[in-house]
Amino acid sequence: MRIKYLLFTLITIIGITFSSCIKDEAETMESDIASATIQDADKYLLTIPTITNNNVFFRLQPDIDERDFAPMFKLSNGATISPENGSKQNFSKGPVQYTITSQDGRWKKIYNVSFLTNTFITYYDFENVKTVVTESPEGKYHEFFERLPDGFEKYDWTSGNEGYNMLAETLLEEGQELSPAVYPTASTEEGYKGKGVKMVTKGTGPLGNMMGSPIAAGNLYLGTFQFTFPAIKSTRFGIPYSTGINMPKSLKGHYKYKAGKDFTVTSKQGSALTKDAWDAYAIIFEKGDNPKKEFLAGDHKFLDPRMVAIARLDNKDRVETDRWTKFEIPFKMVDGKIFDPKAQYMIAIVFSASVEGDVFNGAVGSTLYIDEVELDFDK
C-alpha cells in the first residue's frame, strides 16, 4: 500500500499518467488538510495559515484578542473531518485537535489547529524538538519549535525533511530502520549549549534523480514547506517581522562544518566551486498585499525586488572546522531601500550544508552543525 502511494505521488509530480486503479486507491487513502481559512481573514490574520504534517497555525494580527473561530478546511478528495468543518471552536486554551478520515475509512490523521499571536523571537537555542511520525509514506523525522510564555508551541523553523520523507523509506540500507538520523536535518545532543541542529547533505537515489533532485541538502529555515514540483518551489522562506522593531545589526550563532568528499555538479549552469561549502543568510523583505506571494521562493537568487536588507556569509568565512566556532554576519541595506519600523515586513533565516543545494550541486556527506542563533540589535 505505501509503495503504491509513493509511486502514485511520484508519477503525479512528473506528469505521467498512471493506471486508474492505483490512482483511485491512492486518492481514497489520503487524509490531509490542503488549505485553511476563516471568515474575514484579512481582518484577523497576519499571513495565510501555515500547514505542516500535523499542525495548522493561524497567525493573528497583534490587536486581536478573540479566540473563538470557525475555520474552514479544504481536504483530500472524499475525506471527512471532525469536529465539523466550519464549526466554531474555542482556541484560547491551546490547540484544538481535528481528525481527518480518508474516503475509504482506513486512514486517519490528527491535526493540531492553533490561533497564535505573532510573538517575535530573536534568539533560538533549538532545545525544543518534536518527532513527527507519518504512516503513508512511513516516516519519522524532527521538527523544531519554541515554547511561548502562554504554553503554546511556535513552529517557525522548517526543513526539507517533509520532502525527503517521500523517499526516505526507499533509501534505507539493509538492516537500517527509519529514524530522525536518516533525514537531512535532525536534532543533536552535542550542540554548542545543550541541543543543536545537525544538517547533512543526502543522496536521493533513483527516484530523486527521476524528479530532478539528485541530492537533498541538509537545511533549516524560517518559513514553511509545501511539496510541489519542481522541488525547489516547495520551500517558502519567511515569517512575519514584528512591527515597531528596528532592523537588526547582525545574525549571530555558532557552527561546525565538514564538506563531503565528492562535490557533484548537476546544474546546467555548472559551478565555480570545486568543493562543497556551507551557507547562512538572513533577508528582511516587504510583505506585500498578495497572500499567495507573501513568502520568498526557494529559487529567489537574491533578486526579489521586495528585499530590503540582507545578511549573508562571505565566501572567506565558509571555512571547515571541527570545533564550535562563532559567526556574525552584518545586515546590509539593498540599494535604494530604506527600513521603516512601522511597515510590515517578513524575515527569512536560512542555513544549508551545501551552498548550491538550491540547484542540486553539492557533496553527499557535507555536514553542518548550528546552535544558539540570534538576531543582534543595537542596544
Image: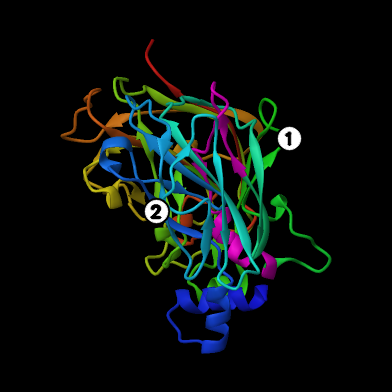
Residue at the location (35% across, 31% down)?
241
Over which residues does the magenta segment extend?
Answer: 143-170
Q: Crowding near pointer 1: few (<14 within 10 Å), some, many (20+)?
A: few
Taking the magenta stretch, the answer to whether it contains residue 161 is yes
x and y percentages locating residue 255 in the rendered image: 59, 34
108 left or right of 59 in image:
right
Residue 118 or residue 302, whichever sits in front? 118
46 left or right of 91 in image:
left
Query: Which secondary structure lies at badge 2?
Result: loop
Query: Which secondary structure lies at badge 1?
Result: loop
Residue 376 or residue 167, whichever sits in front? 167
Residue at the location (54% across, 60% down)?
163
351 left or right of 240 in image:
right
Alpha carbon separation for disc pair 2 and 1: 29 Å
Residue 309 visible (yes or no): no
Taking the magenta stretch, the answer to whether it contains residue 36 is no
Q: Crowding near pointer 2: few (<14 within 10 Å), some, many (20+)?
A: some
In primary-sequence order, the first of circles 2 and 1 is 1
Amino acid type assigned to the residue bearing label 1 in the image: Glu
Q: Is residue 204 above or below residue 37?
A: below
Residue at the location (41% across, 56% down)?
35
Q: Residue furthest top?
A: 379
x and y percentages locating residue 36 in the rendered image: 40, 51
Residue 130 or residue 183, whichever sits in front? 130
**Residue under pointer 2:** 298
Q: Residue furthest left?
A: 336
**Residue under pointer 1:** 189
Amino acid type assigned to the residue bearing label 2 in the image: Gly
